[in-house]
Amino acid sequence: MYFVFSSSFLEMASSRDEPLEVVTKNADPNFFTAPKKNTMAEREDDNDEEEKTNTPLTTMFSAAKVGDCATLSQTVHSSNVNTVDSEGSTALHYAAQNGHVEATSLLLRTGASVNGVVASSKKKKPTPLHDACLAGATSTVKVLVNANADLLARDNIFQTPLHKAAEGGHPSTMTMLLGALTNQNLLHKGLTATDHNSQTPVMVAEDCLALEERRERMGESVVAAVGETPKWKDCLLLLEQASLCAMPYYYE
């Protein structure tokens, strides 16, 4: 996710003669105050909702997101490790995309499916490797690759993990993936794989780079909300170099 601020907006904000309107102490005192629960039934309803959100499964997902191995070891077991939430993600998806190596390894040892769980054959979901590559979590990408994750798996828009690394603009993650594809003799297939828009990973990186350059020409600043600033130019260079290595040779 990126926040885009145009230079014209920033100049306008800094040159205002009048302060922006704010809610003062003279405003309605109940404006920011949640209504009190007056009846026993209302308070009991709140307690019921709190109990629903504190189930072992929600605790497991929360622990995976923050890499809390102590809590994970108490809540995860072989019968629930591949449970999916409302987003179709398993605990492994969250641990991997947030770069939690120990939590990712723990879930895999407990029996987590390295490629996630496919809800149906007609509706593909991103695998944990897809999510880790998009987030640039190189450390957990390595763990998943070593656990034999499918390097050519397709998500709901028919993209591979390499597409996601290109979209995220993560050179280190891309280097890891390209090396793994090479080791499995899948480099050519990975580079030529096309998504639902008939785009290869190279094309995805080119589009992201073009968008970044267009924003710069318009005087806009792109600030990464989380993590390092994307480096699409470096990613594109890596992909182009890999394409030369994967190019088939023909002899007459």
Image: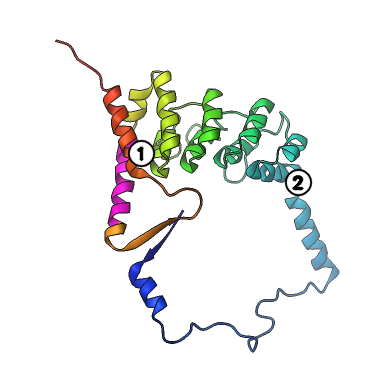
Q: Main secondary structure of the magenta part?
A: helix
For the residue carrying disc 2, how many other residues have a C-alpha within 10 Å: few (<14), some (14-19), or many (20+)?
A: few
Q: At x 51% / y 52%, what residue is drawn?
A: 226
Numbered circle sitting on residue 55: 2
- Indicate the secondary structure of the residue bearing disc 1: helix
Q: Give the range drawn in magenta.
A: 198-214
Amino acid type shown at disc 1: Cys
Q: Can residue 7 be seen in this view?
A: yes
Amino acid type shown at disc 2: Thr
Q: Is residue 160 left or right of residue 50?
A: left
Q: In this view, does 88 lie to the left or right of 154?
A: right
Residue 160 drawn at (x, y percent): 42, 33
Residue 205 drawn at (x, y percent): 33, 42
Residue 212 drawn at (x, y percent): 32, 52
For the residue carrying disc 1, how many other residues have a C-alpha within 10 Å: few (<14), some (14-19), or many (20+)?
A: many
Distance Cα–Cα, label 1 vs label 2:
42 Å
Numbered circle sitting on residue 235: 1
**Nearest to N terminus: mark 1 or mark 2:** 2
Q: Quadrant of residue 17?
A: bottom left
Q: In which quarter of the image is residue 40?
A: bottom right
Compared with residue 17, is residue 222 higher up or lower down, i.e. above or below? Answer: above
Q: At x 39% / y 18%, what residue is drawn?
A: 185
